[in-house]
Image (cartoon, helix red, strand yellow):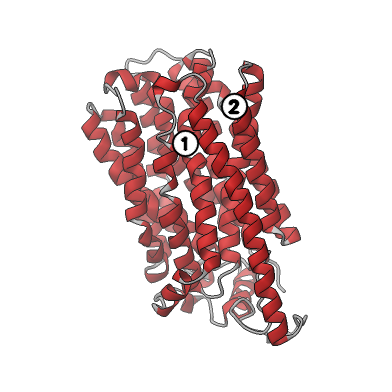
Amino acid sequence: MPSPPRNVLTRPLHRQDMLAYLDRGNIGNARIAGMAQELKLDGNRYQWLLNIFYITYVLFEFGVLLWKIFPPHIVGTVVVFGWGLIATVQAGNHSWSGEMALRFFLGAFEACYGPGIIYLLSFFYLRHEIGFRCGIFASAAPLASTFAGALAYGITSGHSHLANWRLLFLVEGIPTILMTGIAFFFIPDSAEKARFLTAEEKDIVRSRAMRQVGTNANARIGGIKLKDFGHVLLDLKAWLCALMYFCGNVTYSSLPVFLPTILQDMGYTAINAQGLSAPPSFAAFLFALITTWIADKTQQRCLVLFVTAAVGGVGYIILATVDTVGVRYFATFLASAGVFSTIPNILGLTLNNQGSDTRRGMSIVLINLVGQCGPFLGTNVFPTNEAPRYIKGMSVCAAFMFFAALLALAQRLLLMWENSKLDRKYGSVRTSKDSKDIAQENYGPNFRYVL
């Protein structure tokens, strides 16, 4: 099998996704930098600013399929510019209702970007490679949280004429608008149109596309197969991934926006809480890369998922039961590492076990339709009147992480059973170096599910 295309494809996408999570999650930093007082975020108003984002994120989830119907560089350019503009305009907002409207549209644009890029990566990388590329891309979330904490610390510790929280939105929103040009020129429609690939690398991608799905790279963009929608909806494996994604998102959504507040309620000042939220996020960034690489190399993604979810669950148990500040701060490392590495491994598992482009796209839609409902719970289990321990919120997050671990084991058993049926039907997998082998990743005699 020819070598995969260089990671130059994932680099600009990683940077853009990092900005997306920065723009999505910086509301947590803005909240303790003065936004709560100025916009009068009393009662459950802050929770609703989080909820409205995920409501539209779910409603616009079918936008993922736009990446297959229209040229990806056009779709990417529009959504990057849209969310960048809205993220920046937040700096000029003066009311809770205005912020609600902005968060509504921010969710719509980001729903079309992150899941769409994950889908696009499956057009360039094979099943035993895609998990680590999901890890590179999704690790933008904890890396963004790292920069959010450090950047917010730098911005909010100064004495600007502009309110610190407004300056935060401005400084973190403008770079996204500037990335629009990179989206236009560097998001490829196909191998033949990828500006960053050499002629030899384009030939490799064409060959890999034939071996992967049996068609050339250009033919994979421009249409969908409606019957594959129904196949995904009837696939128990897809639903188990969706349930795991729901569990992961209960914690994934709440951690970046509440971590600064949790640290502040441990007794740190608002400024120090901004800075202290960075190290756990950076540890999560490294853990996401390491675990997805291990899962690709071993092709044992369910077992890796079991470990990552369990690590996150242990972190939340400690946060719920221990009073000592130092121990609780250590637990934020465990929670962050477990949560932020579970999500990309679920994405990899989802793409690993669907055998056509449309089914892969629809499975991404499904896990997000179900999974992005998790934030409705996750962002509402940390009410201010339960500070500083947030025992209920921590316990809920721990329970869902452990449930995700059990679902990973159930998924593995199901995949093993499915593979045994395929072995009885087709015999053992034939190993061949014949370059004429095509559609190896479509359903056929050599297709086996990744455990």
| Between discs 2 and 1, the one toward the N terminus | 1
Horizontal placement of 141 versus 25: left or right? Answer: right
Q: Nearer the viewer, residue 247 or 150?
A: 247
- Residue 186 shows which numbered tag? none
Inspect this view and state whether residue 6 appears.
Answer: no
Number of labelled discs? 2
Q: Nearer the viewer, mark 2 or mark 1?
A: 2
Amino acid type, mark 1:
Ser
What residue do we see at 38% from left, 55% from top? 112
Q: Nearer the viewer, residue 440 or 121?
A: 440
Residue position marked by numbered label 2 in the rendering: 319
What residue do we see at 42% from left, 29% from top? 28
Q: Dot 2 lies on which element?
A: helix
Residue position marked by numbered label 1 in the rendering: 254
Q: Dot 1 lies on which element?
A: helix
Amino acid type, mark 2:
Leu
